[in-house]
Amino acid sequence: MDRTQTAAIEPQVATASFTGHRWGLLGVLLPGYFLILVTLGIYRFWQVTDKRRYYWSHTAIDGDALEYSGTATQLLVGFLIALVFFLPLYVLFFYLSTQTPEYALYGYLAAAVFLYFLAGFASFRARRFRLTRTFWRGIRFGQSGNAWLYALIRFLWTLLVIATLGLAYPFMSASLWRYRYRHTWYGDRQFGFTGSWRTVAAPFYIDYLILVICVGAAALLVAQAGDPDAAVGFGALLSVPILIVAGLVFVHLKSRFTSRFLSSVTAGKSKLQVHIKARSLIWMYLFYALLFSIVSGLFVAIVMWFFSGIMEPLFAQQELDLSQVAQLGWANVAGLGLIYLALLAAYGALAETVIGLGYWRMVVRSTRIENAEDLKSARAQGNESPLAGEGLADALNVGAY
Amino acid sequence: MAIAATYHDGQVAHPADVHCRFEGAGTNGRIVLLDPASGKERGSWRMSETRALPGTRHELRLAHETGRAGERLVFKGRDVADDARKRLPFLSQRQRRERGKQFRVLALATGALASVILIYLYGVPLLSNQIVTLIPADAETRLGDAVVEQVAEALAEQGGLEICDTDPQSLANQAISRFAEAAVEGTGTPFRPNVQVVRNSIPNAFALPGGRAYYFSGLLEITESPDEFAGVLAHELGHVVHRHGMQSIISTAGSGLLVGFVLGDVTGISVAAAVGSALINSGFSRDSERQADAFAASAAQRIGFRPSAFAELLARISDDDSFSRAMALLSTHPLNAERQQALQNLDPDNAGLPPAFSVDEWQAIKAMCADTKPPKTKSTPARS
């Protein structure tokens, strides 16, 4: 290739790098889990902060690392504020639990819908919290827009998606991406989003059709099976390939949506290019499934080894009554509790190091930024906001990374 | 000797290469930023206003505390970063101090949470006692009506809560209501006791908020004397009078909130939350059991029965080889040697009082659920 030609193109395209690795992140997470136990759960805010610092500081765009400036105390205060917000909701749940079953069911349903609406609000606010605490080259990111409006848009789109049996999903997804990125800022430089439902229409509707055909064919086969007993067995047998197809469709769409939508993101004159292969995602999930089964097997073995004698009476009954755990004696209850918490920690660490880190690394390493030079003229603007944050998202468990 | 660094002025996203010269050491020292080409000074940071930010080993990232929010000096590369660290020994001191501060915040928060838990464990039995008095009696009765439906649904498999003898004027039902009213007489309870014998194979008896109490046919089958029957009933009516059902609902709600706070799962759906609440509440229910026992003893001052017969019934069930049968009543009424002794000590000298149930009444009660399933009579007197 002509030297001058490469020189003309090369400086325009910037790359991103990720220098973190699984063991490094594990070294942050594991002591964190221990401290969470010692501090009765309070340390989780410090652990999340440490984790983010790990991700951010090991991620460099065009040679300069990101910086996470949020503190654990901000998260703790945010959680306390969210708790105040949740108290009335908790009282409502409590009230519902004392009502007649039928009435309670409707009540829970209404509460679940409200919580879904709230999750949109919380995730948008949490995104603002993270963006305004992210620095690159000394300039803070930011987010404008209204979290209530975002929650409303998300909610209405969800209704439409349900009404259309999922067919409206590309529209919803494009609309929400657009809202998020058009309200994202790097200093005084506003982000943009050039994508639309057409960006992901082809993969989505083809995959949708494949899934419908598979499910339809299976339903036809089951219907022809004749006697009901055979049909049930046949249906159970067919559900395995269907689930595999559904899993593949999910992974494929995740890779397509992420790649195409992220590649539609612009900031001023610069433009993102991201490409994630579905294949890499599949390997990642298979690796996760393998480790997950190993960890689960290990824990089952441990519980069987230590507690087989003690646990028997619990399972001898037809219904497992949790209140009877108390009958086992404090030492055993504490032992079981510790094993349960260790299992939670192991699953958490596994998901974070394999899926969390794997996905982040995939996205970062495939990122190209066209016209990155243009970002150098961005000027600082805005402050930390909200001052104490993420409590709602934390409580609703909607935060990512 | 100067060290190369990248300077972000916190104003424009244009990184600048600078050379840093370190003048002096400690808090009086300065870091002077020099333009690498011209050697001109671009600015200087007092070391006392310089702070290291968390980052990787391969990079030393400094913030200027009196400067702009994003103003940074970054030493890139392991060797360069280590070199700079060596020249700024106070940074690690400040980091230690910062870590100490974080530790204090953490310790304070943990201490606060621990004290909330302790206050909760010791305070809730007292507190729910107080809160319960704030709840109007008719609200509790309405709540009881709703709970009945839930319980009936939960127990549907074993027979639900189908009343054995629906005629309130029958000999057995009249005897039971007479006993119940006599037991709560003079306690000032706003509830009318409503005791029902229901057809359900589980050997259990319990009281619900609002004055309802249920005696299961599964328990009636193995109840051998009117004393045992009266002992159980008086105990359950003790729960009614002390409003324990309501108290336990309040404390369950409270402990769910507490455990939810600890685990960060405010919606309280997780298994851990359920186990945690159950453990906290089991401690609380032991106090209620003692109170109900004491109530049974005080009722026995006026009515002729031995409250300790309840303990004998419990002891007999716990000797029963069928573990699952024993669990139902024992899990709600834990029995240990201490409690058995306490119950015996509570037995008043009431030999002069007429017995709680006459022989005829007791036979009628035993036969209440017998129309479909004859009770397995072991030691009951032969019927005519």
Image (cartoon, coloured by chain):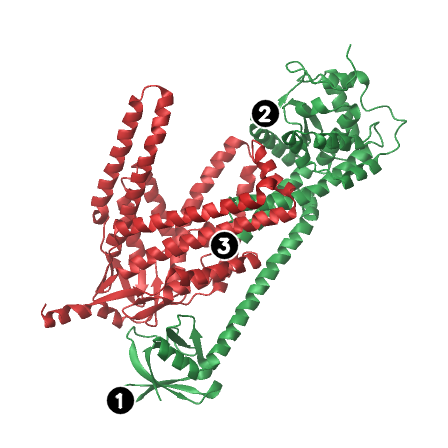
Chain colours: A red, B green
Indicate the amino acid at tag 1: Ser
Number of other residues with Cα within 10 Å of mark 3, as a class: few under 14, some 14 to 19, many 20 or more: many
Query: Residue at the location (81% across, 39% down)?
Result: B341
The residues bearing labels 2 and 1 have C-alpha atoms spaced at a distance of 92 Å
Are the residues under marks 3 and 2 on the same chain?
no
In the displayed image of the protein, which residue is found farthest to the front?
A305
The label number, if any, that marks residue B38 in the structure image: 1
Residue B335 rendering spot, x and y as whole percentages = 73, 37
Ranked by sequence position, the earlier of labels 2 and 1 is 1
Q: Which residue is mark 2?
A: B158
Which chain contains the residue that carries disc 2?
Answer: B
Indicate the amino acid at tag 3: Ala
Residue B378, placed above or below residue B47: above
Query: Residue at the location (56% across, 28% down)?
Result: B153
Query: Residue at the location (78% across, 13% down)?
Result: B382
Query: Residue at the location (26% across, 61% down)?
Result: A367
> Is B257 or B84 nearer to us in this picture?
B84
The residues bearing labels 3 and 2 have C-alpha atoms spaced at a distance of 43 Å
Are the residues under marks 2 and 1 on the same chain?
yes
Q: Which residue is mark 3?
A: A82
Number of other residues with Cα within 10 Å of mark 1, as a class: few under 14, some 14 to 19, many 20 or more: few
Residue B39 rendering spot, x and y as whole percentages = 29, 89
Question: Mark 2–mark 1 contact, CB under 8 Å?
Answer: no
In the displayed image of the protein, which residue is found farthest to the top?
B384
Which chain contains the residue that carries disc 3?
Answer: A
Which chain contains the residue that carries disc 1?
Answer: B
Q: Nearer the viewer, mark 1 or mark 3?
A: 1
Q: Nearer the viewer, mark 2 or mark 1?
A: 2
Residue B233 rendering spot, x and y as whole percentages = 74, 29
